[in-house]
Image (tube, rainbow, N blue to C red):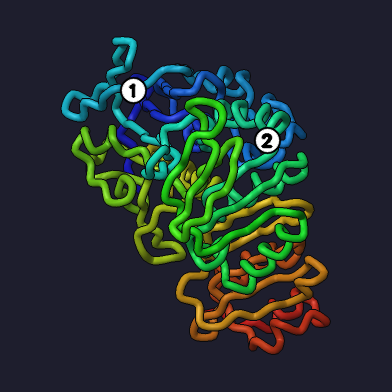
Amino acid sequence: MNEPQLNKNSTVAIVGGGQAGGETATLLRQNRFEGRIILIGEEPCLPYMRPPLSKAFLAREITKDALIYKSAAAYEKAGVEMRLGERVEKIDSSSKRLLLDDGASFSYDKLVIATGGRARPLPVLGAGLRNILFLRSIADVEILQPLLVRSRRLVIVGGGYVGLEVAAVAVKHGLKVTVLESASHVLARVTAPALSDFYERVHREAGVDIRTGATVTGFLAGHEEGAVGLVTCANGERFPADFVLIGIGLFPNTELAIEAGLQVDDGIVVDQASRSSNPDIYAIGDCASHAHHGFLHRKIRLESVPNALEQARVVVASITGRPIPAATAPWFWSDQYDLKLQTVGLSEGYEELVIRGNPLASSFTAFYLKTGRIIAADAVNRPGDFMAAKRLVGDRMVIAPSRLADDSTPIKTLMIEAAPA
């Protein structure tokens, strides 16, 4: 347990207005921190949930208000000073001060960096043309929404979660949608080929043109001056586009940390207490590369809301001198059409794939095994399997593949029979 060194005259500053930052601010007060809490966020709105941006919000199924993570009243009750629509220009770690873009400055005793990440650009010819877009914020979606209504052709570069989620929304709007993925299959970094084949089939049946092994080499202007009209690929193919969405991952926002002299290696390097190389500065969420000792036993940067919220709990425990909760198995989700994919664990390095259920019926779970142990699972429209898989993966349980594949045996029975690692 850490020894708390703060009192009611101390200040904790949080840089970043996403879910991680918002959660940290209110949790500090709930854990009886009595000092000053300042949250500084570049976007003008309250911390909000990003996962629905490419799903329900893009489809206009929910309003902007439904994205808000916690109400203004929650921060007011917690006594959090919200500095929204403002940007931190510099972290002066020697004097422990933050310098803002409007000239204001704040001193801090402890600092939490929760700056997230930004969409990764595609550095090819014509990348600066209009209507080549990204999806990372409310503002990004508000640009995309009218294009879904007045356009006919959308090209998506990248067959990851965001690209496929947007494709599912766009094709429902009647657009001709093409997905260009440079890898040999979609979702290549996160799922087995069997899962990729399933999602490719679903999208193609919905009318999406999925092209794998397609390397984009540039963009050409169309009839509208300065706006994209064609997407070119290395094999010579060209795809007409009224607008383009780039969805090839993100860069962690680490510039402030680098300038402040913190250790950075694919994210701000932090220990299991989310503490950076400077003992008074912490980092959490998409911008942090943390020591995941509780489950993965290695350094990793995870891009997921559950991870960000878990790290918020860790950093609050560290700052307030409470026991540090152990890291749990990471989990993720994706909604496409009427399919809910729920993933727990990381499948990289798996040796055996076991399918439980029927992919043709769009109800199945893929279990990933390594040395006989369950290291990850992808559940499609199977929330019960997913809840069980969180324990199976978390405890690295061992179940015979033939038993795991037997859908006639309740998964709760298998959990009782399972041997922990």
Residue 20 percent location from the top left of the image: 49, 37
Mark nearer the N terminus (1 vs 2) = 2
Disc 2 marks which amino acid? Leu
Residue 31 visible at all: no
Could you tell me which secondary element the residue under label 1 belongs to? strand
Which of the 4 quarters of the picture holds residue 135? top right
Disc 1 marks which amino acid? Val
Q: At 39% from the left edge and 66% from the top edge, which residue is drawn?
A: 297
Could you tell me which secondary element the residue under label 2 belongs to? loop
Which of the 4 quarters of the picture holds residue 212? bottom right
Q: What numbered label is drawn on residue 281?
A: none
Q: Nearer the viewer, residue 84 or 56?
A: 56
Q: Is residue 98 left or right of residue 182?
A: left
Residue 103 percent location from the top left of the image: 29, 10
Within 10 Å of disc 2 (Cα), the crowding (few <14, some 14-19, many 20+) is: many
Which mark is nearer the camera, 1 or 2? 2
Q: Nearer the viewer, residue 4 or 316?
A: 316
Residue 211 visible at all: yes
Q: What numbered label is drawn on residue 88?
A: 1
Residue 129 percent location from the top left of the image: 46, 32
Q: Which residue is mark 2?
A: 58
Within 10 Å of disc 1 (Cα), the crowding (few <14, some 14-19, many 20+) is: some
Residue 121 percent location from the top left of the image: 41, 42
Q: CA distance from mark 1 to mark 2?
A: 29 Å
